[in-house]
Amino acid sequence: MGKRKKKSSPKIAESADRHRLYELSVQCSEAEIDFVDDTFKKLRGRRARLLREDFCGTANVCCEWVRRRKFNRAIGVDLDGEVLDWGRTHQLGRLKPSERKRISLLEENVLTVKTEPIEVISAMNFSYWLFKERKQLKRYFKRVHSQLADDGILFMDAYGGYESYKDIEEERDIEDGDTTFTYTWEQEKYEPISGNLICHIHFDFEDGSRMERAFSYDWRLWSLPEIRELLDETGFSKVTFYWQGFDEDGEPDGEFVPVTEGDADAGWICYITAEK
């Protein structure tokens, strides 16, 4: 009789949750809401109560917003029903009932969704870059402008620098309890005539397994002047860029301050506010 084949042990990559890995690697909802909350108060002299998270994914930011204060409400908008369901189970499921009832998740298109007048609309993690044509992004900004309250503010982020045009991979080790994994950001291809940018996120684990292309992005690498011009054209009264500083070791310090001129760094990240 032939020998039985020894069953191979399951690979970590086969059972890992890509949405959880994304949140651990990419998103820091606490820092994001710190910036949104404090900046709105500085600009408007009061705290906002209603936030809409466009391209909300797992609704991590919505959940952080309602945890901040008992009168805060959030609306999340995303076309992907699968990721919204994940968020309902793993994010909203961890909230108190009183917090959960203050969140509404909508499986709708941000270009057509209708909501009540919103004080804060957030479009972070470069999500609006999926609009690759000028007329598409202009349509989105125009739609946001119409949905904001009279003193509402659109919050976004952007990145750039001369390394953003290169085909590169960047790795970072991340610890989650007893597990360590490696997050890899890959810029596969930048095409200079169209501005198209193809990127991927990969995860590697201690057992040698890999979650290849856990997330992929087909974007346009929008420049800050292009973004500002479109915001001006769609009726926003003031656009401000917030640049990240660096500590004494040359590492990003997480502090963003308003600027009129940025630095020509290899890589930079900034926040943008567009006031109605």
Image (tube, rainbow, N blue to C red):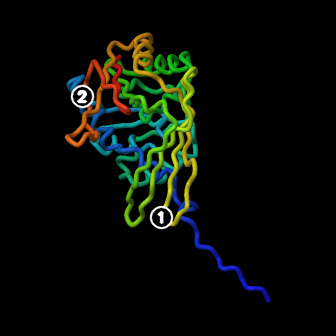
Q: Which image quarter: residue 272? A: top left
Relative vertical location of residue 179 with respect to residue 239 in this rendering, above or below: below
Secondary-structure class at tag 1: loop
In front here: 235 or 199? 199
Q: Which image quarter: residue 69? A: top left
Of the residues shown, which amino acid type is indicated by label 2?
A: Val
Q: Position of residue 256 (x, y in %)?
A: 26, 32
In front here: 159 or 43? 159
Few, some or many residues within 10 Å of mark 2 (<14, 14–19, 20+): few
Secondary-structure class at tag 2: strand
What residue is at 58 percent from the left and 73 percent from the top? Answer: 9
Counting residues from the N terminus, which is met first, the one under dot 2 or under dot 1?
1
Left or right? Give the position of 22 relative to 1.
Answer: left
Few, some or many residues within 10 Å of mark 1 (<14, 14–19, 20+): few
Between label 2 and label 1, give the one nearer the viewer. Answer: 1
Instruction: Give the label on residue 206, or none.
Output: 1
Report if the CB atoms under discs 2 and 1 are less than 8 Å apart.
no
Instruction: Give the label on residue 257, or none.
Output: 2
- The image quadrant where one finds the C terminus is top left
What residue is at 32 percent from the left and 15 percent from the top? Answer: 238
Q: Position of residue 233 (x, y in %)?
A: 44, 10
Relative vertical location of residue 105 with respect to residue 210 in this rendering, above or below: above
Q: Position of residue 37 (x, y in %)?
A: 27, 34
- The image quadrant where one finds the N terminus is bottom right
Q: Position of residue 130 (x, y in %)?
A: 54, 29
Q: CA distance from mark 2 to mark 1?
A: 39 Å
